[in-house]
Image (cartoon, rainbow, N blue to C red):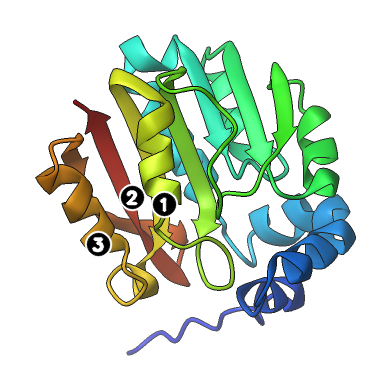
Amino acid sequence: MTTTTILAPENVSLIKARGCRSREDCLSLYAQWAATYNLDLADASQNYIAPFLVAEIALGFTSQVTGAILDAGCGTGLVGEGLARGGATTIDGLDLSPAMLRMAEQTGAYQNLTIGDLTQRIAIQDETYDMVTCVGTFTHGHVGPDPALSEFVRVTKKDGLVIATILGEIWRSGGYEVEVKRLEAEGLVDVISTDLKDYRAGRDKANVVILRKR
């Protein structure tokens, strides 16, 4: 006998997020959504497990996770919370949305929280961080591969790590795979993994990209 799994309807705010067409669209949406974002996506109906998965992966790299970490596109702070629970103590967050940053501040996981646009050069000096994490930002309607991925590499120290999720359905079509290969071909990084893993369990997957800076 075949068992049919019936999924809950897609979250309306998530549909709007993936339909954003500009910086202003994103700012407007997250100003309205920030207060209920965690409740909407982390519950059983949406199963948004990517932040916890990336925090778990990051915590496995003990030499980097005990150093300085940038959580880029930190949103409400789900990744930072996971890192802090695992023992990370020096975490900075960066996000486009002031409303989301206010929620991240309430977690107590971050030392510094800064407004920043990942479609532009990041106002951070070269080789500042031992690790950069980025979850939920490389998706429809948000941030493309260039310059964000190269910027993450730039602000990472030698032998440091970049760990980022890229929604699986745009991994190739959005140019992310090509950009990762370019960074590797130019001798900037070693690609540790680009494995496809659950993003929202039972709904969609993401390539979890792990890069080590040369």
Depth check, front residue: 75 or 149: 149
Q: CA distance from mark 3 to mark 1?
A: 12 Å
Residue 158 visible? The answer is yes
Pointer 3 residue:
177
Residue 143's place in the image compared with 132, above or below, is: below
Q: Earlier in the sequence, mark 2 or mark 3?
A: 3
Pointer 1 residue:
165
- Name which residue lies at 78% across and 46% down: 100
Q: CA distance from mark 2 to mark 3?
A: 11 Å
Q: CA distance from mark 2 to mark 1?
A: 5 Å
Determine crowd level at label 2: few under 14, some 14-19, many 20+ residues with C-alpha closer than 10 A: many
Q: Amino acid at mark 1?
A: Thr
Q: Are marks 2 and 1 in contact (CB under 8 Å)?
A: yes
Residue 109's place in the image compared with 35, above or below, is: above
Residue 57 visible? The answer is no
Depth check, front residue: 177 or 84: 177
Q: Amino acid at mark 2?
A: Val
* Quarter of the image where one finds residue 159: top left
Pointer 2 residue:
208
User: SS for tag 3?
Assistant: helix
Determine crowd level at label 3: few under 14, some 14-19, many 20+ residues with C-alpha closer than 10 A: some
Which mark is drawn over residue 12? Answer: none
Depth check, front residue: 170 or 61: 170
Number of numbered discs present? 3
- Name which residue lies at 45% across and 49% down: 148
Quarter the N terminus occupies: bottom left
Mark nearer the viewer, 2 or 3: 3
Residue 95: percent from left, percent from top: 68, 43
Determine crowd level at label 1: few under 14, some 14-19, many 20+ residues with C-alpha closer than 10 A: many
Mark nearer the viewer, 3 or 1: 3
